Image (cartoon, helix red, strand yellow):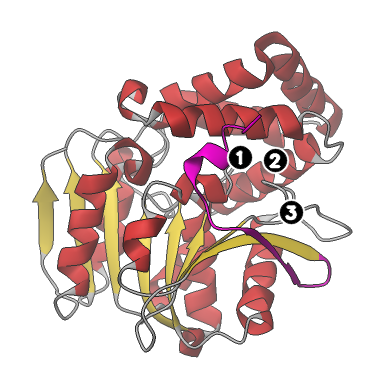
Amino acid sequence: MTGAIDRLGLPPERWADVDGPVHYREWPGPAGEPVFVLVHGLAGSLLNWALVAPRLAERGRTIALDLAGFGLTPPEGRGTSVGSSWRLLDGFLRALKLPPVILVGNSMGGMVSLIQAAHHPRSVERLLLVDAAFPRTNRLAGQFSPGVAALFAVYAANRRLSERFVAARARRLGAEGLVRETLRLVATDPTRIDPALVEALIELARRREGFPHASEAFLNAARSIFRAQVRPGPYRRLVQQVRTPALVTHGARDRLVPVKAAREAARFHPNWRLVVFGDLGHVPQMEAPTLWLDAVSSWLDEAPADSEGEAAG
């Protein structure tokens, strides 16, 4: 019987060796065109790109990976913090001997992509930041919501307490409940997300219930994000030193990363273009893939611009 993931029609699974196995999938594209590398966010996987990767591949070879501890990539002694994920991404680009790529990062994946562009700018031709986890601003409007801040504070609290909290939530909700609750948080209207993708996400979540590393990987990543936001100075300086051209897409109704944080980050970069989707949340590539892809195509067809765009979600 064909599973929900198989029904998405994804290209075959592949594995790279980056001090351990890394799971990825690759959509072939026209030769001589850019290479896109897609980096998911916290609790995500390469499935988060399933709705947009085929059209990106019309523009160039497109590769989506699972970071260590997420999707099907096991930690195998590798860390799962943001810094560890960056080192894995850098090693992945080297292992596949890729030319300078268009690095596409959502949420935590955007944070990891920014670190790559700051430390190894020659490896990144352009950045495509999708509701990236930008540093919080000094202004009230750019702070994370009290609910989100409280949740991450729980994750960063006493290790045993946070592990019990995550385990109890998983038992209460089950795989399907976890997926659907997460989608309610990250999407303005989760019913917009293709039901076939939702079923695939649930199938993966059920598979990951048997992974002993799943909760620890999530918590380690969440704690590292929290630490970077509690004292955002170093991360803010890193973002400001990035010189790579970028398209910054952000949902105006993002509950996790305030759009003000994206505006503040873009303000320091004349070669960044900001496109705000008025009625979308944290995962526009899943909630409104065609709208998101149209914005990306427009940017790819032009030289990176200084201006800011507003798009109706």
Q: Is residue 80 left or right of residue 292?
A: right
Question: Is residue 107 shown to the viewer in this render?
Answer: yes
The quadrant of the picture occupied by the C terminus is top left
Image coords of residue 217 (percent x, y): 75, 44
Q: Is residue 41 visible?
A: no
The span from disc 2 to disc 3 (Cα, nearest Å) is 13 Å
The residue to which callout 3 is attached is 73
Q: Quadrant of residue 86?
A: bottom right
Residue underneath mark 1: 43
Q: Main secondary structure of the magenta part?
A: loop
Residue type marked 2: Phe
Q: Report the mark closest to the observer, 3 or 1.
A: 3
Identified at 31% across, 38% down, the residue is 140
Disc on the earlier residue, 2 or 1? 1
Q: Quadrant of residue 139?
A: top left
Q: Amino acid at mark 3?
A: Thr
Q: Which residue is found at the position 55% from the left and 51% from the top? A: 46
Q: CA distance from mark 2 to mark 1?
A: 6 Å
Residue 245, given in percent of the width and then of the height, sits at 30, 78
Identity, as a three-letter code, of the amino acid under mark 1: Ala
Rounded to the nearest angstrom, the CA distance separating label 3 from label 1 is 12 Å
- Front residue of this view, candidates 236 and 19: 19
Provide the residue span drawn in magenta.
1-20
